[in-house]
Image (cartoon, grey):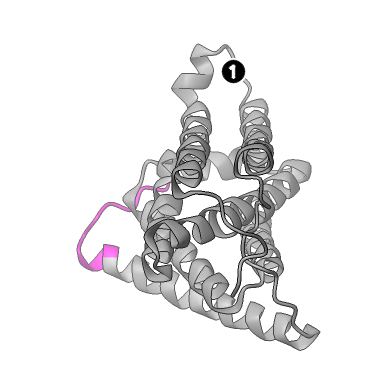
Amino acid sequence: MDATAQPASKAIMLKGMFIVLALLFCVTLTGLPPVLQWLGVQNWPMRFFITRLLFWACLVGAWYYCKKQERQKILLWQQVPYPFWVYIVSLLAIYVTLLVGAGLIARLFAGLRLNISQTREQQMFTMLRGRYWLVLLASITAGFVEEILFRGYLLPRLAAVFSSKVWAVILSSVLFGLLHFGYNSWYHITGAFFIGLVFAVYYARFGNITILIICHFLWDFVILLAKTR
């Protein structure tokens, strides 16, 4: 895949990535109960709503930095178009891969007798029950914001900085996994790393961010609907 424009210097791209990642991790930290309690936000749905809006603000910040400092598009890699049937096949292939991977990760943690804490996740499911507008907001945020920032924004820039798509895929996936530290569980971090790895490999190979946005949205939306009925 070729870049759509002459890339900015590595130093400028590194600076931008550091700022965006710092903001993302600060948003995740802000979403933790002790921090929001300290900020005076006691209502759980309001906490969740605020953090989703902050993630969108990070996306806007990344876009603004790319426009004003890098002077290039947020998506460096040219979008590769595909016929409709490729979307269907890709969605099915990604879902099967994620399901198999999730099962293997669960077996690995169980076999090694590692802690699989789902307390924070269950708290989120309880809070979202009956609040379908928040379920929709969460799914859209995950599908659009996370894919644009981690696959569309970070992955090509890491590939340019390290001159390696392989390292870019690995590093972006590690960062994506670590961003889920708010679940307070290595099980969830490992699962997020695997999801990020699958999506990053797909984007590096096929260059279509739209398929990943749809897939990520549906993955989160179906799970949240099933867990919050």
Nearer the observer, 131 or 1: 1
Instruction: Decide if residue 198 is on the left or right side of residue 133.
Output: left
Tell me the SS state at disc 1.
Answer: loop
Where is residue 135? Give x, y as percent.
70, 47
**Looking at the rendering, which quadrant does residue 60 occupy?**
top right
Graded by Cα atoms within 10 Å as few (under 14), some (14 to 19) or many (20 or more), the crowding at tag 1 reads few
Amino acid marked by disc 1: Gln
Residue at image coords 64%, 81%? 90
Residue at image coords 54%, 74%? 202
Nearer the observer, 229 or 209: 209
Q: Does residue 200 show up magenta in the picture?
A: no
Residue at image coords 58%, 45%? 125
**Looking at the rendering, which quadrant does residue 171 occupy?**
bottom left
Name the dominant secondary structure of the magenta segment.
Answer: loop
Q: Which residues are magenta?
A: 109-118
Q: Is residue 221 above or below residue 12?
A: below
**Is residue 152 among the parts visible in the rendering?**
yes
Nearer the observer, 24 or 128: 24
Instruction: Decide if residue 60 is on the left or right side of residue 172.
Output: right
Where is residue 98? Give x, y as percent.
50, 72
Would you name the residue on which mark 1 appears?
42
Q: Is residue 137 above or below residue 7?
A: above
Q: Quadrant of the N terminus?
A: bottom right
Q: Is residue 116 above or below residue 57?
A: below
Residue at image coords 24%, 56%? 114
Where is residue 211? Give x, y as percent.
69, 71
